[in-house]
Amino acid sequence: MARVKTDERIVVAMTELLRRQGYAATGIKQVVDAAGAPIGSIYHHFSGGKRDVAAAALRRSGAAYGELVGMLLAPYDDIAEGIEAAFVSASETIADSGWLNMCPVGTVAGEVADTEPELRTIAAEVIDGWVEQGSALYRARGLPDADAHALMLAVVASLEGAFILARTQRSTAPILAGGRAMGAFARQLTAAAANTRSDTAAPA
Amino acid sequence: MARVKTDERIVVAMTELLRRQGYAATGIKQVVDAAGAPIGSIYHHFSGGKRDVAAAALRRSGAAYGELVGMLLAPYDDIAEGIEAAFVSASETIADSGWLNMCPVGTVAGEVADTEPELRTIAAEVIDGWVEQGSALYRARGLPDADAHALMLAVVASLEGAFILARTQRSTAPILAGGRAMGAFARQLTAAAANTRSDTAAPA
DNA sequence: GTCTATATTTGGATAGAC
DNA sequence: GTCTATCCAAATATAGAC
């Protein structure tokens, strides 16, 4: 037994509790109970205590969702179609799960942005990673750098906000509306990029 | 002294602490200290304790922001312009405040959506109020009911998410990107509504 | 009704046996 | 290195004096 290492079980348990309850409401004892580990284990594996474990959980979730972003967007040549499909997929997942929070990063980020500098910084790095990854994909499909960046920033913000609204209202409508809006933005930007290209290719 | 009634001072103090720390991290003692009231006052004025005070704070904030939404959007005949201006205004406010959270509703909603049914319901009512108010304005400017609703839903979600990203990254970029995206969505919807009207007026 | 003192539980963290 | 027992501070809530 204990096929999975203790420190990893602790991080997984923390991740799970963070997305349901957030950082402040999650107790170290809850975490070790869920992980099936004694209290002392926390401080053996994570000398920084609760904050240290939460930091590891944020980074872990960040990496996992970074991969998901790539997998969801990559199959679509059309940027707007990819974004719309991603929002639809997210709305189905959250509804099927009974409106469970998908990812702790947004929730925890909102909670600790004014009070926990270290966790705020880590959340910022995680989000930056998503934005870099997504905007690279958009650049590869022809968007200028600044537009690609703005688009992915808007997509992440819209998704995080829509998750909160969806969980609060028990409705997929906010996510679907967000997807439509981001599709409109993507189409506006791709059209502008196409115009710029044809202008350059065949100027007046 | 004590010109303001005790129960109101308590609610104001709770509101302030909620937007900085969220619900779980905010203690009743912190609230009464900030309000200059003894502990007993809480349970005299709010028999439901901490949850009851937070509920009052959420409703109060909801009403205040509902008024703000109307004030920000009303001066603009063009829907997209009004939305873009509102996002720009929000980005300036949050930067000037030193990235302070503007409103507790989004933060608390994300935190308690899976754990505090009563507060979740109240947050849902507050958000519903905003969406109803905003979409009524959009309908008055010519958008069909469903589009007006989807637009305001997307705007609120985008704004809430952008606030989290802005506070986390210490940057107005997410809010400005969100504003551009919502402007694009609004223009798409207004153009579609205009086409429908001209089709009806002069059918093929 | 205002406020103080306190009951009770739980929080994070540590010491030290094994 | 794993785990138990415990520390101390802080949490919410209550009882009851004034």
Image (cartoon, coloured by chain):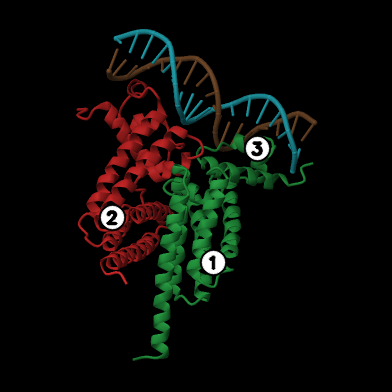
Chain colours: A green, B red, C brown, D cyan
Q: Which residue type does callout 3 highlight?
A: Ala
Which of disc 3 and disc 1 is earlier in sequence? 3
Label 3 marks a residue whose chain is A
**Numbered badge on residue B151:** none
Task: Quadrant for residue B148, please give it.
Answer: bottom left
Q: Is residue A119 above or below residue B6?
A: below
Q: Amino acid at mark 2?
A: Tyr
Q: CA distance from mark 2 to mark 1?
A: 35 Å
Local crowd at mark 2 within 10 Å, few (<14), some, or many (≥20)?
A: many
Q: Closest to the observer: B116 or C15? A: B116
User: Circle 2 is placed at which residue position?
Assistant: B138
Q: Secondary structure at mark 1?
A: helix
Q: Amino acid at mark 1?
A: Gln
Determine if residue A66 is in view. Answer: yes
Q: Quadrant of the C terminus of chain A?
A: bottom left
- In this view, B157 is above or below A168: below
- Please tell me in which quadrant of the rendered image residue B172 appears: bottom left
Secondary structure category for the residue under label 2: helix
Q: CA distance from mark 3 to mark 2?
A: 48 Å
**Is A96 left or right of B158, judged from the image as shown?**
right
Residue A34 numbered mark, or none: 3
